[in-house]
Amino acid sequence: MAKHKYIETPEELLQFFKEYVKHEQDNPMSKIEYVGKDGRIERTPLETPITFDGFECYLRDRNIIKSHLGHYEDKNNESYKDYLPIVTHIRQHCYVHNFKGAAVGLFNANLIAKKLGLTERIETTNIEQPLFLDVPKDNSDKQNP
């Protein structure tokens, strides 16, 4: 018996993603600061990263899926092959959003780099130096004939 698709069409999956992005924009996290001599509380809304994991949580919280979207991006599952371009688009959107956010200082660059699997590579070259250099013998004591 075929597994029930919680999200019936690729278009519906894309629509859910757009709703997730809007939900994140409409519900920012807040930075709380205590200002002035009285310590008045000020809340500064902060944009949150759009992530594939966050999207899956959003879908679970709304009881749209039960666990994850793994089936929807399985290249070997013919039943879900039409979803693959949409899942790829969603993953790329998340990647670009996080990369741009880190690049302009909106998100913590170190956290985003780890999440995106980016690493800074520093190549070092070790050149072995001899302890004593072979200095050519001075032939100045030989007289030219």
Image (cartoon, rainbow, N blue to C red):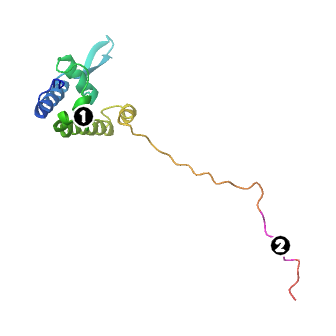
**Image quarter (top left, top right, bottom left or bottom right) of the C terminus:** bottom right
* Residue 50 visible in rendering: no
Q: Main secondary structure of the magenta part?
A: loop
The residue shown at (37%, 35%) is 109
- Residues tagged 1 and 2 counted as in contact (Cβ below 8 A): no
Q: Residues within 10 Å of mark 1 (few under 14, many from 20)?
A: some
SS of the residue under disc 2: loop
Q: Nearer the viewer, residue 8 or 134?
A: 8
Q: Identify whether 87 is placed above or below 35.
A: below
| First to last magenta residue range | 134-140
Q: Is 139 contained in the magenta span?
A: yes
Rounded to the nearest angstrom, the CA distance separating label 1 from label 2 is: 74 Å
Query: What element does badge 1 sit on?
Result: helix
The amino acid on which the numbered mark 1 sits, given as a three-letter code, is Glu
The residue where tag 1 is placed is: 73
Q: Please say whether residue 105 is one of the residues in the magenta stretch.
A: no
- Judging by the rendered image, the residue that carries numbered circle 2 is 138
Q: Which residue type does callout 2 highlight? A: Asp
**In which quadrant of the rendered view does residue 90 lie?**
top left
Indicate the position of residue 72 as horizontal and vertical percent values: 21, 31
